[in-house]
């Protein structure tokens, strides 16, 4: 299981990730005391599909593993590296 996380230092609030997330797991949050907006992932809604991270133009989203990945995902990674 994975979960997306936004790096607030990199995020410029462009909203590209929000448009990609069909689970409505990303929202813009106003930075306290400023007019700047940053994306934030709701961990209760994020399913780890990874649609958002490649869409971020500043590479501001990382996918965090939550514990041991499912066996099927491990096989997919191993298989792709081994070429089968
Ligand atoms: S990983 Fe998928 S569900 Fe989670 S925030 Fe990104 S697009 Fe939404
Ligand atoms: S796509 Fe990246 S820069 Fe744009 S709002 Fe999302 S995290 Fe921020």
Image: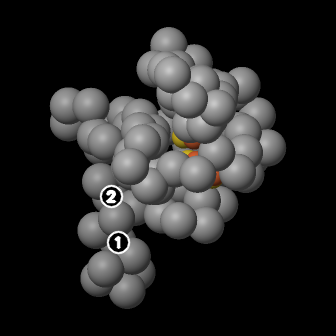
Of residues 75 and 62, the one nearer the viewer is 62
Mark 1, residues whose alpha carbon is within 10 Å: few (<14), some, or many (≥20)?
A: few
Q: Residue at x 49, y 20 (%)?
A: 32
Q: x and y percent of residue 52 in the render?
A: 61, 49
Placement of 84 over or under 74, stated as above or below: below
> How many numbered markers are drawn?
2
Q: Are marks 1 and 2 in contact (CB under 8 Å)?
A: yes
Of residues 74 and 55, the one nearer the viewer is 55
- Image quarter where the C terminus lies is bottom left
Of residues 60 and 73, the one nearer the viewer is 60
- Image quarter where the N terminus lies is top left
> What's the CA distance linking mark 1 and mark 2?
6 Å
Q: x and y percent of residue 46 in the render?
A: 54, 27
| Residue farthest to the bottom, as pictured | 83
Q: Residue at x 35, y 72 (%)?
A: 79
Disc 2 on helix, strand or loop? helix
Of residues 29 and 80, the one nearer the viewer is 29
Q: Residue at x 50, y 13 (%)?
A: 44
Report the side of 83 relative to 45 (left or right): left
| Residue farthest to the top, as pictured | 44
For residue 54, say whether it is visible. Answer: no
Report the side of 14 relative to 10 (left or right): right
Q: Residue at x 60, y 59 (%)?
A: 56
Mark 2, residues whose alpha carbon is within 10 Å: few (<14), some, or many (≥20)?
A: few
- Label at residue 75: 2
**Residue for badge 1:** 79
Placement of 67 over or under 71, stated as above or below: above
Q: x and y percent of residue 71 in the render?
A: 30, 43
């Amino acid at each position: 299981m994975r979960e997306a996380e936004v790096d607030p230092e990199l995020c410029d609030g462009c909203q590209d990730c929000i448009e990609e997330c069909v689970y409505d797991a990303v929202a813009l949050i106003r930075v306290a005391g400023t007019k700047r907006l940053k994306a934030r992932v709701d961990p209760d809604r994020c399913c780890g599909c990874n649609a958002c991270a490649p869409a971020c133009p500043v590479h501001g989203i990382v996918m965090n593993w939550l514990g041991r990945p499912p066996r099927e995902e491990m096989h997919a990674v191993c298989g792709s590296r081994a070429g089968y």
